[in-house]
Image: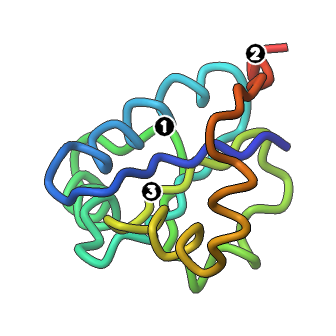
Amino acid sequence: MKIITVTGYKGGVGKSTTAVHVATFFSELGKTILVDDDLNRTALSWAERGSNSVSFPFSVVSEKQAMKSIGGNDYVVIDTPARLIILKIGIDDKLTSEYSGKNFNYPNLLE
């Protein structure tokens, strides 16, 4: 299972839209689920609106349903609330300084 997280500091910059597009892409490669952790519940709202006409080619659940729902999926796309990075990294200055200035080698999710 591959986990892809869409995150950003500012709200209203298209994280939910990006998460839906990323989930659509990965749904063509394998079973995909989108976890909507955004407080606005945008992806869940869009999924509910489209259920009567055109639906997403993947499941959409809230973060409260995630642990019960992600099993058996090849890809998990997580739509996060704004400022998540600050909340997680800002907890410990040592963590922040430990990772600053490092180059990360991100895995190729398509392999």
Residue 42 left/right relative to 108: left
Residue kind at label 1, given as amino acid type: Pro
Q: Residue at x 65, y 73 (%)?
A: 66
Q: Which is more N-terminal, label 2 or label 1?
A: 1
Establish if 23 lies above or below 16: above
Q: Which is more N-terminal, label 3 or label 2?
A: 3
Q: Which is more N-terminal, label 1 or label 3?
A: 1
Q: Which residue is drawn at 58% across and 67% down?
A: 89
- Residue 57: which disc? 1
Q: Which residue is drawn at 38% across and 31% down?
A: 21
Q: Could you tell me which quadrant the N terminus lies in?
A: top right
Question: Which callout, 1 or 2, points to the residue nearer the camera?
Answer: 2
Residue kind at label 3, given as amino acid type: Asp
Where is residue 17? Give x, y as percent: 27, 41
Residue 26 left/right relative to 15: right
Which residue carries the number 3 mark? Answer: 79
The crowding category of the residue bearing disc 1, from other C-alpha atoms within 10 Å (few below 14, some 14 to 19, many at least 20), is some
Disc 3 is placed on an element classified as strand
